[in-house]
Amino acid sequence: MRYFSKALFILAFVGLHIPNIQAQEVTETNQEDFDEFTYRQGNLYRSASGKPGPEYWQNAADYAIEATLNDVDHTITGKITVTYTNNSPEELDFIWMYLEQNRFKADSRGTLTTPIEGNRYAGDLEGGYDISNLEAKVKRSTSSKYLIDDTRMQVFFNDPIPANGGKATVSMNFMYKVPVEGMDRMGRLDVEDGTIYAMAQWFPQVAVFDDVTGWNVEPYLGAGEFYYDYGTFDYKITVPWDHIVVGSGALQNPRQVLSPTVRERMDMASKSDTTVYLIKPEEVNDPSIRAKQDGTLTWHFKIENSRDVAFGSSKAFIWDASRINLPSGKNIMAQSAYPKESAGANAWDRSTEYSKESIEHYSEKWFEYPYPVAVNVAADIGGMEYPGLNFCGWQAEGAALWGVTDHEFGHNWFPMIVGTNERRYAWMDEGFNTFINHYSTLEFNEGEYPSRLNRTRNLTGWFMNPNREGIDTYPDVANLNNLGMIAYYKPAMGLLILREYVLGEERFDNAFRSYIKTWAFKHPQPNDFFNHMENVAGENLSWFWKGWFYGTGNIDLAVDGVQAYQGNYVVSISNKGEIPMPVEMRVTYGDGSTEDITLPVEIWQRGDSWNHLLRTDKEVQSVELDPEKMLPDVNFSNDAWPNDFYDR
């Protein structure tokens, strides 16, 4: 059967003839561009509307940790007890845990897959866990059996953990040397007044067992980040008396670790919208500002409904704070800890201001921040995020410090609140976060710093690179030259296009807010996101997900010509790229007036050319596609008529 353009068929049927415009006979349609591209049907665990199904489940892990940081030999020793709840419908004979410090061993998979020239994810090779005294209990039955393979540990039980709510406990002692270079995620930095310890991936942690994959056991190689269950973390860190410790969650024992002066300032900061010093620059080496003057102190923190914790410790910290105002009326606290080398009027002195504004913006626009503090720590790390705490570059200032602070705090929404699998789907945290960063930057101080995400055509050179990869490429597999685009910018641009070009702000925002609320503290998969956005926004977007997220095709819309016809005009356009798109078209008339016309994406279902009948008695002076330049169209030279439009 042959298919014809519907518009041309109608013109032919009523006996009309358009001079010099030939009706094209199309032997096949573009329906494959619009078909479903994966199996997205729902089930009892995940519905077709992109919500958790009636029998959705996820397991939980609660942690009690006591650890000691030795600042002489740079080691951390501790004991961890995990209470694991098996909410799955099957018994578990074992659990898998991550030992991510084992990445810092000469024979780790991450080391052996790092190229000779190195990359961002290289690190020290003298680390790795020493594990001892492991006990795995189900009821009264205790096992000490475990197996360690690279960055993973399999812990066996004598009796299985019962399904549907059964519990087990796993306890062990651990010790390792803190690396200097921690793959730009953690480590230590020497400054004039001491060492800054940026502590992350610092304890054994349970891997995720879910309804999609079972045990998620991809090794920690470097580029792929993390995927954890939610729970309560109750942890105590013992450090030398002169250290200040900041961590994920609320400090439980301020009277034991803070002097009366610092406690008084903390109270002042909790009521202030401007930054208040807790430890002033001139007090960094003043023993009288500390809670005691010898021995050690144990700092006790707790955070609930979290997937991880991190902390920073140093005797070199300047420490300041202010109040964060949340939409519900609740007040929490922004804090910054940094050395004097990072201080400056447009540097880390503004960190708490940046943190406060970032958290308040995302809480108002998308979903309220759930944690009691938001801490920014200066470290020898470009930028890395954990629940309620960031590590950001100690030399950053101005726009760079705002950008990294805002980006890392944005990660509290993706993947800390919406708990995606970063090791597989970096675009669901980095890309989504880069997208929301655009709007927070535009709003901060009425645009004090620029955001360039909407300048999509600045990146079309990458889109023409034959070595480009798809967004769906796993981060550990991706060419590092592509990772910034496929994890960060291309998915962020995709959401921008959906919001600003395809759906409009209201429909997009309703759907995106609903997605965050629906999957808060849960584990969505890519299809859950696709399904939920479509159902709430009311639009079948298979053509977009397939073309933008699961391919390497490009956008190239073109104006082929404009011709007079019976007192009107016909505008001929074509889709010369691989991704269909709605058409935004601006017509300028001879009298100087303009008209914006939108054509739906369905015009490309039957072929790659389309004729639009422009009913007007005015002279058409020019036609321009995508006049706001929202699309990363790879060939803008054919976006307008007449051909010399952009040369005028």
Image (tube, rainbow, N blue to C red):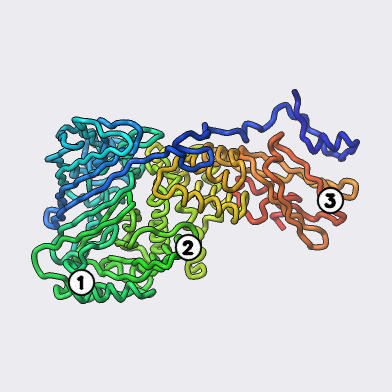
Q: What residue type is labelled 1?
A: Val
Density class for disc 3 (Cα within 10 Å; few <14, some 14-19, many ≥20) is: few
Q: Marks 3/2: CA distance?
A: 44 Å
> Is the Cβ of the residue at disc 1 closer than 8 Å to that at disc 2?
no
First along the sequence among labels 3 and 2: 2
First along the sequence among labels 3 and 1: 1
Image coordinates for residue 3, horizontal then vertical, percent: 75, 29
Image coordinates for residue 427, horizontal then vertical, percent: 45, 45
Image coordinates for residue 314, horizontal then vertical, percent: 20, 62
532 or 104, nearer to the observer: 532
Q: Residue at the location (40% across, 40% down)?
A: 475
Q: Marks 3/1: CA distance?
A: 74 Å
Q: Marks 1/2: CA distance?
A: 36 Å
Q: Quadrant of residue 337?
A: bottom left
Question: Given this view, does label 3 or label 2 mark the residue nearer the observer?
Answer: 2
319 displayed left or right of 422: left
Which disc is residue 284 wearing?
A: 1
Density class for disc 1 (Cα within 10 Å; few <14, some 14-19, many ≥20) is: many
Density class for disc 2 (Cα within 10 Å; few <14, some 14-19, many ≥20) is: some
Which residue position is annotated with label 3? 615
Residue positioned most to the left: 295
Which residue position is annotated with label 2? 364
Q: Is residue 344 above or below residue 358?
A: below
